[in-house]
Amino acid sequence: MRPDWDRYFLEIVNVVKSRSTCLRRQVGAVIVKDRQILATGYNGVPRGITHCSETGCLRQKLNVPSGQRHELCRGLHAEQNAIIQAAYHGVSIKGATIYTNAKPCSICTKMIINAGIKRIVFEEYYNDDLADELLKETDITVECIKIDR
């Protein structure tokens, strides 16, 4: 059966996340406008930096719980990488939708707000109260869509 557009882009997110070298959680993001993919991103270290799969996970070494101290990581989140890729290539993402397999954290949410993204579609809930508070003050549409596999 032919998927609707949201499910189509969420399926692509799950292909994008397969590039992640994160040892804790693989996340992908796809930014779309007018049914066209503008940028993709997955969580991982910056260009030219040794992957965590080789160095080990800093967060595990420091015993940092999930959802806390996001800055204590060698990598970038998928949403951050997608936004950066759009900027790097000079692509406006104002008014776009971002698809991701996990609800964005508060840091990514702040970037999404300032980038002018108007819709967030995710597959799995990620608990971050600050992200939820921030989103309540915006006109960004947030939707959770589960995909049957």
Image (cartoon, rainbow, N blue to C red):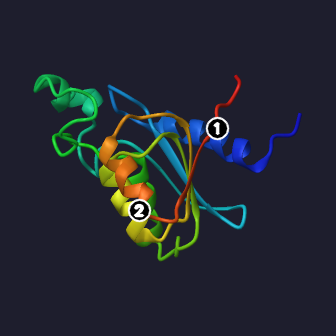
Corner quadrant of residue 58:
top left
Q: Is residue 66 above or below residue 72?
A: above
Considering every residue shown, the one lying at the far right of the view is 1
Callout 2 crowding tier (Cα within 10 Å): few <14, some 14–19, many ≥20? few
Corner quadrant of residue 83:
bottom left
Query: Contact (CB < 8 A) between labels 2 and 1?
Result: no
- Residue 117 lies, in percent from the top left, at 51, 65
- Residue 145 lies, in percent from the top left, at 64, 38
Q: Is residue 139 above or below residue 45?
A: below
Callout 1 crowding tier (Cα within 10 Å): few <14, some 14–19, many ≥20? some
Q: Is residue 61 visible?
A: yes
Three-letter code for the amino acid on which mark 1 is drawn: Ile
The residue beneath circle 2 is 137
Q: Residue at x 20, y 40 (%)?
A: 73
Dot 2 falls on a residue whose secondary structure is: loop
Query: Which residue is at the front of the view, 41 or 116?
Result: 116
Q: Earlier in the sequence, mark 2 or mark 1?
A: 2
Q: Is residue 81 visible?
A: no
The residue beneath circle 1 is 145
Q: Residue at x 33, y 42 (%)?
A: 129
Q: Dividing the image into 4 quarters, which one contains the N terminus?
A: top right
Dot 1 falls on a residue whose secondary structure is: loop
Three-letter code for the amino acid on which mark 2 is drawn: Glu
Considering every residue shown, the one lying at the far left of the view is 62
Q: Residue at x 45, y 64 (%)?
A: 138
Query: Which residue is at the front of the view, 84 or 111?
Result: 111
Left or right of 73? Residue 139 is right
Left or right of 4? Residue 120 is left
- Residue 34 lies, in percent from the top left, at 71, 67
Q: Is residue 70 above or below residue 41?
A: above
Q: Dividing the image into 4 quarters, which one contains the C terminus?
A: top right
Q: Using the image, tell me which numbered label, if any, was put on residue 134.
A: none
